[in-house]
Structures are given as C-alpha cells and as structure tokens.
C-alpha cells in the first residue's frame, strides 16, 4: 500500500499533540497490512462515500480515502471523541 505524504497542516497537528512517532508506527503497519487488528480500520458513514479511518492511539484517528489503486490519501487527523 502506498501512502501519499501528509499536508503541512496535518504534520503540524501531529507535532502539536506529540503524535508524530505514534502516527509513523501506525502508518508503517497500514502500509504493510491494512487489516491489522491494531489499526481498527473503520468504514465511516455514509458508507457510499468510501471514507475510512484508522487508530493512531486511543484518542486520535486518521481519516483516509483511496485516491488511486493501491494509494491512500490521509485527509484528516482528529480527536475521535469530539
């Protein structure tokens, strides 16, 4: 799986919340196996839009789409409980 580079705003969001290392670890797992149970990948509502998320840690999730075949674009990182 190929993952596109993050936008600058998302990089800054990770740095501000000290999530850079956790994100890098989860990103590596995502590249190797999208179905890894530690990622807890979910198809978000409405399902027909094909937007997914994976766990960075217990509080934060990354939202992504498949932009091209075998290519993932992370479009948002957010607090899962807000």
Image: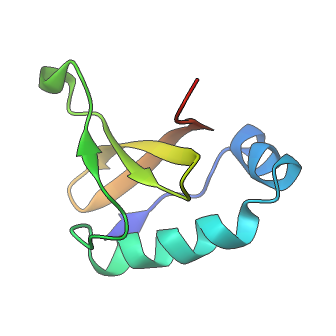
34 lies above or below 59: below
Q: Residue furthest top?
A: 46
Tell me which residue sits at (37%, 54%) in the image: 72
Locate residue 13, reporting x and y percent.
Answer: 77, 43
Tell me which residue sits at (50%, 70%) in the image: 26
In this view of the protein, which residue sits in the foreground, 10 or 42?
42
Locate residue 77, reporting x and y percent.
Answer: 59, 40
* Res 48 quadrant in image: top left
> Along the horizontal axis of the image, is 27 left or right of 15?
left
In this view of the protein, which residue sits in the foreground, 21 or 57?
57
Locate residue 4, reporting x and y percent.
Answer: 49, 57
Q: Residue furthest left?
A: 48
Quarter that holds the C terminus: top right
Q: How is the image coloured?
A: rainbow
> Along the horizontal axis of the image, is 57 left or right of 34?
right
* Res 67 quadrant in image: top left
* Res 1 quadrant in image: bottom left
Tell me which residue sits at (82%, 59%) in the image: 18
């Amino acid at each position: 799986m190929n993952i596109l580079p993050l936008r600058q705003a998302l990089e800054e969001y990770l740095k501000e919340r000290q999530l850079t290392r956790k994100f890098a670890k989860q990103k590596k797992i995502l590249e190797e196996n999208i179905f890894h149970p530690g990622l807890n990948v979910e198809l978000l509502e409405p399902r027909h839009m094909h937007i997914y998320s994976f766990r960075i840690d217990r509080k934060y999730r990354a939202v992504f789409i498949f932009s091209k075949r075998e290519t993932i674009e992370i479009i948002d990182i957010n607090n899962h409980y807000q």
